[in-house]
Image (cartoon, rainbow, N blue to C red):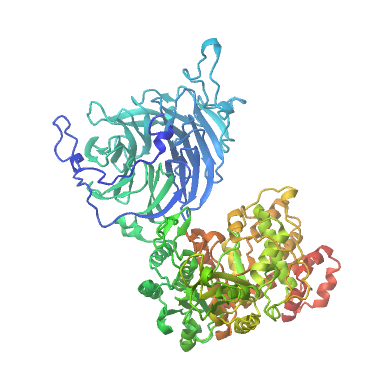
Amino acid sequence: MSTLGLSSQAGLAPPTPYTGSETEQSEILSGPRPSGILTRQPSQDIGDKQSEQLPTLTHRLRHTSSILAIALSDECIYAGTHGGEILVYGLRTYERRAVIEAHRGSVLGLCLSSDQELLFSSGGDRMVNVWRTSDLSRKCCLYSSYDVGDIFCVAYSTALRTVYLGAQNTTIQWCSQDQKGTKACPKGQQDGLGIRDDPFFDSRGPGGVRTPRPADADVLPKHAKGGEIIEIGKENAKHFAHYGYVYCMVLAKTIPEAPSQEVLVTGGGDGMVKLWRLDAKNGGAPEELNTLDDGREEGHSILSISVEGTFLYTGRSGGEVDVWDLETRQLIRNLKAHRDDVLTISIGGGFLFSAAVTGYVRKFDRQYQLKSRLRAHDGRILASAFKYHRRRPIYVTGGSDHTLAIWDVSDCVTSPSSMTKTSNEQLVDSLARFVGFRTVSSDPRYAVDCRRGASYLRSVFKNFGATTEMLSAQHGCNPVILARFKGNPATSGTRKKILFYGHYDVVAAENKMGKWLADPFSMQGIDGYLYGRGTSDNKGPILAAIFACAELTSEQALGSDIIFLIEGEEESGSRGFEQAITANKHLIGDVDWILVANSYWLDDRQPCLTYGLRGVIHAKVQIESSHPDMHSGVDGSAQLDESLKDLVMLLSTLTGKNGQVRIPGFYDPVLPLSDDENELYDEITKALVQRNSNVGDPQELKTSLMRRWREASLTIHRFQTSGPDNASIIPRLAKAAISMRLVPNQEAGEIAQSLVEYLHAEFANLESNNELTVTIDHQAEPWLGDWRNKIYQTLEEAIMDVWSVVEPTHKRTRSSALPPTVQVPEAQQNGDAGGSYFAAKPSPTTSSILANGSAETPGVANNPITELDAKLEDLATEDLSTSSKRHSREQQQRRKPLYIREGGSIPAIRFLEKEFSAPAAHFPVGQASDAAHLDNERLRLVNLYKSREVFKRVFRELPCRIGRRVSQQVSSLRKIKYVLGRSRPLHTTRIYPFYANLRHRPRALKYISLTGLKAAALWFVL
């Protein structure tokens, strides 16, 4: 195989990074060429000169092998790899949609049909596969009658329905489904396609012995199956098309010799470019039109080709790029663009992008002047492509560093119409700038960055038309941003008001140990995620909500006032927040609902809604002696009251077996588990166990979740002592940091007072001469929302609409069926304070297990209203075919969120509920694996975009909630009326006759009884 095909592993290792200029000044062609080559004109490339505009890296997608070929459709990136796979990524969110195991050897060429319905791939296994882009199934497979070697390139003529390929054996071959001479491969030989005996390596030695093939030589790639198998006839081959490998080809329609006809342009290892007319009457056979020769005795190989209008661009070995005028067939420019081989070139936006094995990309303008260069890959650049995606120009490169890089070249394009960005792109750009501010509230060094971050966020509000105020906080704390998007002016007196709470401060992040994939304050897109401190907690959700309001405002669809309160001290206990809100309550006004988006899903698959948070008390317990630090060998004795010993004994009295807190009355306010909430835990357990085998026993999972979410707990975090750090010191002072997590109905103030009193009482029992000090550093109230209220119902429907249809699941065996409903054991009656929920001590199921182990998304049950509608529809349309009814039901299946509680605390949420007498709801945006507060914090692009859509629906529909629900119920009742064959209007129907008639329709009674009370109550209203 050639070096271009990278068949040897030696060519895959990234080269040593270049530290100097990629092209030395002496290498630039700066004078006229010898008189014998009059068409060659030198480039005026001036080496390392850079323009002010550079492509910016939008996203980087990682894989396990080199990227050798790229094709771009309107919605997808297709990338062929050294490992024989075709990777499929979405251009909108960069999520990997599929991995096609396509070839035994490397995928060397990719091509899309003009209608983008077919994808053609060629590889080192001597095959061309044709794939349907709709479902990525193989349509057919082409193989040659000759031993062609590697197939470096492939092109497809939609007009002629003909595939063209360039091969290692110097041939150009073609195949049409309509032409004569093609035939189906005989049955039984399909597995052996492409595996022919090599005349040397497979020849028999002495005694007739032949070296055996590798064990996996006959194993077909997983997806290279199905479809028709077609042999390319021997007559459909142009031998010695080039005197060297046929490296590249492209179809063009702007050739003067063949106006309005497709012409095949090929480049080969002989350094020549050839133009071929395609004879439609002869099955699309190529006929040579012209040969473009630069006049060299020994030409450098043509490794890449691109055509724009009547200009042809070729990338050559040795680092040169040639520009040909196809009208005059003259070489009008020769650019010494790189130090080494130019493997790929792309044209777009008025610029020429050349990429080489050095890892650099160079950009030239229409005058072929060098505008900029950038290091795109830590290795060879092997493929590239340019395309407009939703009017935004993008440039994609692939390299031997096993990555794809997506570059935003909007700033490089001069056409104003192509500069328009979509809302999603503005959202990502704004988030990148927002993350760039080191808004670390806990570190005074970043006080100025916090102020700058707040100013930037305020400018975002202003740019979208919101009115803003900067509310000052006491004691020099970071300010609170108050912003308001006003709804329809005609309804100013009756408009509902939704308050959105968030925070722009973040926890500290350093990358001194290199644990982050990138600078934590320079957001990077990698594998469909946005990495950076604050992307998930909480800058991404804030901007998603802002953009949702901006879109509704631009559409004149905002029917309510949306009030934003964004503080800058949440990560430091919300210092000064309550005082700032109380002092400026007259500016905020009344509030009807409160919305928070500051947490995460339970796993990485299913959206959630949070309806409960634990509260927290942070305290320090300090014991101090009157004596100084002493040496244990000199002064230590049983009579000495040691501060650290007293502290350990005192803290040991706080908890008992299984973590029971021993403070009297600690568990008395805890609310019992209701039947409704128990059902929510059953739903969570079923959903998690079904797709995550690592969570273990369902009972233990349910126990673990309840302990984390609805049980109060006490934790000792750290000890600190005075004196030097050695093993001989008796410290004068010892202190410990502790926290208590509270559950709803426990008052933080009362629990804090009980803690202080308990510690002093237990310390008195020690009869120590030391002094005890207990300090309450911070406290936050627990919160429990009503998941049955209007805002939660609106959020649920918005999530189900935005996250759309649940992904299909594979047919399961009995062993993988849903687990049985687990029951909560009775509370202990052993007299211990409060009584724990469980006598046993289960192993905790951590968030990392749930995040890392979550697999496919299983089918989620519909809500009762949807189920009723589906079943009534079946009853009312019994004459419909089974397939039609099944399709109707599948259309109604949507992803229902899990209702969860969390063990963490948000100080502001309960305060805001009390202050404004409004119900709050909590909508988690991120996934469990987002690593908030940890290294490599991230937010998935899909979650960012979909959260904006959820916010948009909630802000638009929540004020109209009552009217819409009545409409939905009336719709369901009209279906009931249809089933029963009733003719009277609904409002004249009475409850008793309604149920009396159900006796004669037992099937309808069975399903309608699901919502009997709700239907009856609504009927009374009507």
| Quarter the N terminus occupies | top left
Q: How many marks?
A: 0
At which x and y percent is residue 531?
45, 59
| Quarter the C terminus occupies | bottom right
At which x and y percent is residue 1021?
72, 81
**Depth check: 221 or 250 in front?**
221
Horizontal side of 640 relative to 305 (left or right) equals right
Horizontal side of 202 relative to 448 (left or right) equals right
At which x and y percent is residue 479?
41, 79
Residue 191 versus residue 932 in the image, above or below: above
**Depth check: 776 or 810 in front?**
776
Residue 44 versus residue 486 in the image, above or below: above
**What residue do we see at 50% from left, 40% from top?**
85
Horizontal side of 481 relative to 343 (left or right) equals right
At which x and y percent is residue 501?
51, 76
Quadrant for residue 8, please give it.
top left
Residue 883 versus residue 471 in the image, above or below: above
**Depth check: 111 or 618 in front?**
618
Quadrant for residue 750, please give it.
bottom right
Question: Is residue 862 among what the camera can see?
Answer: no
Horizontal side of 819 relative to 598 (left or right) equals right
Question: Is residue 135 among what the camera can see?
Answer: yes
**Depth check: 990 or 126 in front?**
126
**What residue do we see at 48% from left, 61% from top?**
937
Residue furthest out toward the front: 634
Residue furthest out toward the top: 207
Quadrant for residue 1003, please give it.
bottom right
